[in-house]
């Protein structure tokens, strides 16, 4: 009968972290270029992985190119650590790289996410990898990708401004709930993945490195630490996040954190914070003082941690 050590031995049929060395070297070079030109979409040779495209192959390739045996990895999907997609990606990374995993956002060195940025403020030692389904912010106004890239080169984003204006005229508000276009370092407009508007301000002047990767589109782009990220907004119609005033988390009793709405019979609704790792820490802290919870981007009164950013 084989021993546990034999079963846990590295499989010689696979490279460390699954990708071969040439693929990891090529992707790291693309990432360096993306960091050097914030918001610019850098093409790369997206490899085949044992998951289908559209399930996080872009983020997974970036994570596999960066991860080492001393890293601690956290994977979330819609803010949950235990969703099927997040659990499968986390298990695959741990098996292929031997890295430890965690649900605590502040203990992770690499965080791979779809749809959310954790509630607690991330730090300089951390890298956030966002899975991106559609990296092109101009796709909704210019379907020809060749022309869209020319608009990027000329910094011509008039069509995006026109789209926002049309929504204001028609609905009296901007209806974009996610992938809200934002200007990075005053030059390139990028799509910040499918994160909600609530999370977009967290990219501004953030201490951590953000890498956004779309495996199907073969594009990677980045927001380096302490870089300006501004949502497109009119001088007289400022950018606003989702209005969740009055919503209270059913588990923690907290307010002014991004929540999921749970419809109930009779038309009522319950609410819970969508960051499950943060909820676990808050509940654990209520039972023991040994658990510490980090500072959040929005305080309990709903004030953003950078004064004057949200009007």
Image (spheres, rainbow, N blue to C red):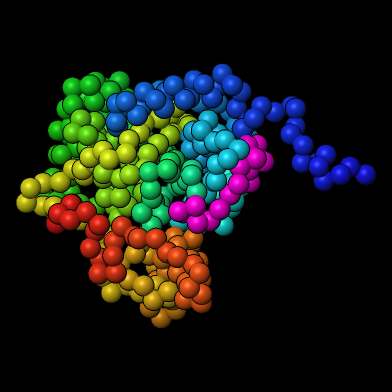
Residue 154 x %, y %: 18, 22
Looking at the image, can residue 113 be seen? yes
Q: Nearer the viewer, residue 300 or 267?
A: 300
Does the magenta segment cover residue 95?
yes
Q: Is residue 44 left or right of residue 308?
A: right
What number of labels is visible? 0
Name the quarter where the N terminus is drawn.
top right
Q: Is residue 126 left or right of residue 234?
A: right
Q: Which residues are magenta?
A: 91-107
Q: Nearer the viewer, residue 105 or 201?
A: 105
Taking the view exactly as shown, the residue that stands out farthest to the right is: 1
Q: Is residue 182 above or below residue 221?
A: below
Residue located 22% across and 21% down the image: 153
Name the quarter where the C terminus is drawn.
bottom left
Q: Is residue 46 above or below residue 295?
A: above
Residue 67 x %, y %: 54, 36
Residue 29 x %, y %: 44, 21
Q: Is residue 77 above or below residue 42?
A: below
Does the magenta segment cover residue 290?
no
Q: Quadrant of residue 14?
A: top right
Residue located 18% across and 49% down the image: 167
Taking the view exactly as shown, the residue that stands out farthest to the front is: 290
Looking at the image, can residue 262 be seen? no
Residue located 43% across and 34% down the image: 213
């Amino acid at each position: 009968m084989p021993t546990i050590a034999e079963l846990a031995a590295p499989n010689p049929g696979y490279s460390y972290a699954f990708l071969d060395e040439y693929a990891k070297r090529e992707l790291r070079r693309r990432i360096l270029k993306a960091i050097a030109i914030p918001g610019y979409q850098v093409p790369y040779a997206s490899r085949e992985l044992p998951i289908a495209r559209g399930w996080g192959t872009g983020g997974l390739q970036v994570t596999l190119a960066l991860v080492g045996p001393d890293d601690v990895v956290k994977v979330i999907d819609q803010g949950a650590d235990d969703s099927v997609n997040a659990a499968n990606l986390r298990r695959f990374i741990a098996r292929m790289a031997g890295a430890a995993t965690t649900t605590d956002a502040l203990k992770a060195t690499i965080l791979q996410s779809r749809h959310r940025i954790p509630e607690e403020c991330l730090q300089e030692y951390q890298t956030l990898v966002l899975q991106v389904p559609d990296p092109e912010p101009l796709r909704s106004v210019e379907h020809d990708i060749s022309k869209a890239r020319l608009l990027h080169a000329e910094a011509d984003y008039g069509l995006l401004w026109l789209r926002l204006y049309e929504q204001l005229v028609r609905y009296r508000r901007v209806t974009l709930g996610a992938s809200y276009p934002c200007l990075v370092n005053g030059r390139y407009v990028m799509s910040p993945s499918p994160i909600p508007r609530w999370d977009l301000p967290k990219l501004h002047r953030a201490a951590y490195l953000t890498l956004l990767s779309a495996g199907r589109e073969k594009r990677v782009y980045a927001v380096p630490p302490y870089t300006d990220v501004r949502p497109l907004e009119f001088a007289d119609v400022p950018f606003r996040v989702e209005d969740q005033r009055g919503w209270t988390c059913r588990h923690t009793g907290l307010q002014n954190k991004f929540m999921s709405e749970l419809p109930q019979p009779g038309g009522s609704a319950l609410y819970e914070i969508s960051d499950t790792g943060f909820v676990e820490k808050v509940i654990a802290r209520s039972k023991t003082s040994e658990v510490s919870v980090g500072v959040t981007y929005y305080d309990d009164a709903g004030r953003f941690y950078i004064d004057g950013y949200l009007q």
